[in-house]
Amino acid sequence: MILTQRTKLREQDPKIRSHNFQEVSLGFNLQEAQSEAQRCLHCKNPRCVAACPVGIDIPGFISHIKEGNITEAAAVIFRDSSLPAVCGRVCPQETQCEGSCVLGIKSESVAIGALERFVADYCAENDCEPTVEKQELKDAPKVAVVGSGPAGLACASDLAKWGYKVTVFEALHKLGGVLAYGIPEFRLPKDTVLKREIDKLAELGVQFETDVIIGRTLSIDDLFDKEGFKAVFIGSGAGLPKFMGIPGENLNGVFSANEFLTRNNLMKAYREDYLTPIHAGKKVCVVGGGNVAMDAARTALRLGAEVHIVYRRTEKELPARREEVHHAEAEGIIFDMLTNPVEILGDDKSWVRALKCVKMELGEPDESGRCRPVAVEGSEFEIETDTVIMALGTSPNPLIVNSTDGLEANRRGGIIASEEGLTTRAGVFAGGDAVTGAATVILAMGAGRKAAAAIRDYLTA
């Protein structure tokens, strides 16, 4: 008999977790994982696999969980994913694998993400991880990977498994890219979960160099001409924050979500034994409705602030994951819907004192398919606040494009690349947010894997 209801995932109580940075979701234990695995129908044509950007054999690893063969389940996952513990925590499964699950048509889909996380965590905690096969390649060419985020790590992993000599160059002092600086500790523990995933790549032979800014420390030409690399993959992400362009954005107390989260996540500002300066304020307004807005808001809450999310559409149109919205609401985040800032007001010392807004109403659908928000005439009002965090998305940094002859970008700053990652410069490949702009971890990983295959074809042609 197939259970219709999902196995409940244990979480920290909202009243407790809103005051700490420990992981919110506690994951499945073995009994819970096996119970959830029993719900899988093992479809002949599994739609979940087709909806996974890296193509994990989902029914395959779930069948091993049923039998209690967790090492074998991990071996199935590791064939296609280098970051299962990360993806199991932060990927939007509800719009990808779980969103395509047949069970979800009439009941609840299988908790694929939670099962993936369970397998990775269980093997790490019980020292039963499978041995990853690595090919031996005679006179293996050197490949440079720019950026240690999800696209770069996925590309590096596949290339290393195929026997190539891979070096990953990271601009920051810590590895992980957006996984390290953008995702809060309460969603993705860095020194345990993220570190062990990256350590597995090092065991495959991937070399890592931090504090190297490609386009400044070394150029793309240097990688070819001076360092001897035969191909380069650019997975440098999209770390350039966007602002609204409204009056008052230069006041003290206005931050991009990027800066706020980087100070807290990468530089450990939430810990008392770190002296990283961070201004959380007593009342924070986060402008935006995506996952980054939820991360910034929930971080500010844990730093002691009253937090409002200011969004110009309704909760129905919020682009953030439903799980993240639910968690934010449960923790006490206040949602000011159909509200749009028009000015940030300051005091006589140039610090933020209020956010001037207008009420909105939804009009006809725009090019995105969502109803266009329209300002209500005469509806101006102020929200008293001392901190404003702009979470409006990011775009690729133009440094690499501007310093590399023959490498072209589109009008949004994304590197022009084919579906397989081929750019306008021979031997240079790109994928992930550096091409598409800010997207999801798993889509970036999928792009990294496609580029790795294209690089292999290029080097063996």
Image (spheres, rainbow, N blue to C red):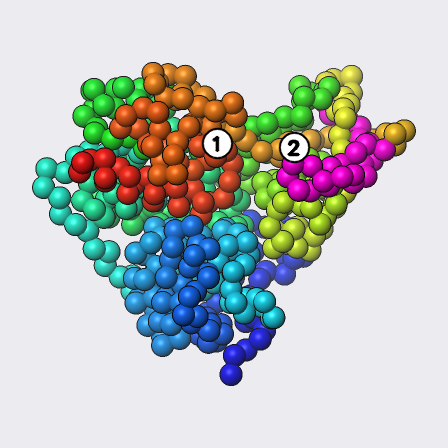
**In the rendering, at what x and y percent does residue 51 appear?**
46, 55
Query: Residue at coordinates 36% horizontally, 67% vertically from top-left?
Result: 60
Numbered circle sitting on residue 118: none
Query: Residue at coordinates 62% horizontally, 33% vertically from top-left?
Result: 392
Q: Measured along the vertical axis of the image, is residue 207 above or below residue 317?
A: above
Rendering quarter of residue 257: top right
Most common SS among magenta residues: strand
Amino acid carrying mark 1 in the image: Ala
In the displayed structure image, the side of residue 263 where residue 389 appears, left or right: right
Spatial CA distance of label 2 from label 1 is 18 Å
Magenta stretch: give its range: 351-376
Disc 2 packing (10 Å; few <14; some 14–19; many ≥20): many
* Tag 1 secondary structure: loop
Q: Earlier in the sequence, mark 2 or mark 1?
A: 1
* Tag 2 secondary structure: strand
Of 358 and 182, nearer the camera is 358
Rendering quarter of residue 421: top left
Among all residues in the image, which is located at the extreme bottom? 1
Among all residues in the image, which is located at the extreme right? 378
Amino acid carrying mark 2 in the image: Ile
- Residue for badge 2: 389
Residue 135 appears in view: yes
Residue 353 drawn in magenta:
yes
- Residue for badge 1: 238
Disc 1 packing (10 Å; few <14; some 14–19; many ≥20): many
**In the rendering, at what x and y percent does residue 38 appear?**
46, 76
In the displayed structure image, the side of residue 317 where residue 205 appears, left or right: left
**In the rendering, at what x and y percent does residue 114 appear?**
48, 62
Q: Quadrant of the C terminus?
A: top left
Residue 187 drawn in magenta:
no
Query: Residue at coordinates 40% horizontally, 75% vertically from top-left?
Result: 66
Q: Measured along the vertical axis of the image, is residue 135 above or below residue 122?
A: above
